[in-house]
Amino acid sequence: MMGKMEKVVSIERLDGTGFSIELEDRAGYLRVLVRGDEDSQAVSVAYWTMIGVECSRRGTTAVLVVEDLPAWPNVPAEVFEAVTDAAVAAGLREVRCAFVDQHEEVEANEYGMMIGTEKGLTIMMFSNESYAEHWLRFGSPKSDKRHSNT
């Protein structure tokens, strides 16, 4: 009896100080899994910078970032400023970003998303990868100008 043929997926791993990222090309977007032992401003700035470099190198226009770092309670506002500044500097204004944080407080990430949007990033936060992938592939009807009355 023949088994089901499985698709071979190539995952590239890059290591940073205190974290690693796994990059996987998927249909229409790049999936990035961020892992590490702690979250900090330095880790967040570094991994968003690496993601920007990889998106630029690959010509990626959409990225799904799954953060698997321990929760960081009471993140100071200046951290979100620094992280979003790093994302902008890394060229991520040109990339549609979906973000799934497996451990963090929703309110903190919503604040970071608002700061990023004010700086010209196209970024949305999701509770799971399925919703994030759907948004990357199909967008949001509310933001689709074809549905506008203007």
Image (cartoon, grey):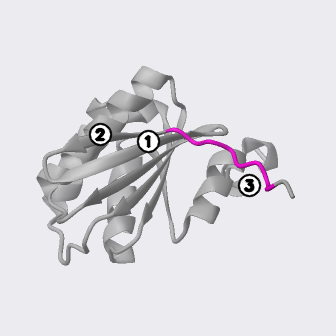
Q: What element carries label 2?
A: strand
Residue range corresponding to the magenta coloring: 3-10
Q: What element carries label 1?
A: strand
- Asked if residue 116 is positioned above or below residue 57 in the image, the reply reads below
Looking at the image, is mark 2 or mark 1 earlier in the sequence? 2
Looking at the image, is mark 1 or mark 3 earlier in the sequence? 1
Q: Residues within 10 Å of mark 2 (few under 14, many from 20)?
A: few
Residue nearer the viewer, 107 or 31 = 31
Q: Name the residue under label 1.
A: 23
Residue 12 visible? The answer is yes
Q: Where is residue 43 in the image (x, y as percent from the top left)?
A: 18, 52
- Asked if residue 65 is positioned above or below residue 102 in the image, the reply reads above
Q: Which amino acid does label 1 sit on?
A: Leu
Q: Name the residue under label 2.
A: 14
Q: Which of marks 2 and 3 is in front?
A: 2
Q: Mark 3 points at which residue?
A: 141
Question: Does the CB distance between marks 2 and 3 fall below 8 Å?
Answer: no
Looking at the image, is mark 2 or mark 3 earlier in the sequence? 2
Separation (CA) of disc 2 from disc 3: 35 Å
Q: Predominant secondary structure in magenta?
A: loop
Separation (CA) of disc 1 from disc 3: 28 Å
Q: Where is residue 127 in the image (x, y as percent from the top left)?
A: 52, 71
Q: Which amino acid does label 2 sit on?
A: Leu
Q: Which residue is drawn at 39% across and 46% down?
A: 22
Is 76 displayed left or right of 13 in the figure? left
Q: Residues within 10 Å of mark 1 (few under 14, many from 20)?
A: many
Q: Position of residue 132 (x, y in %)?
A: 58, 58
Question: Does the CB distance between marks 2 and 1 fall below 8 Å?
Answer: yes
Q: Nearer the viewer, mark 1 or mark 3?
A: 1
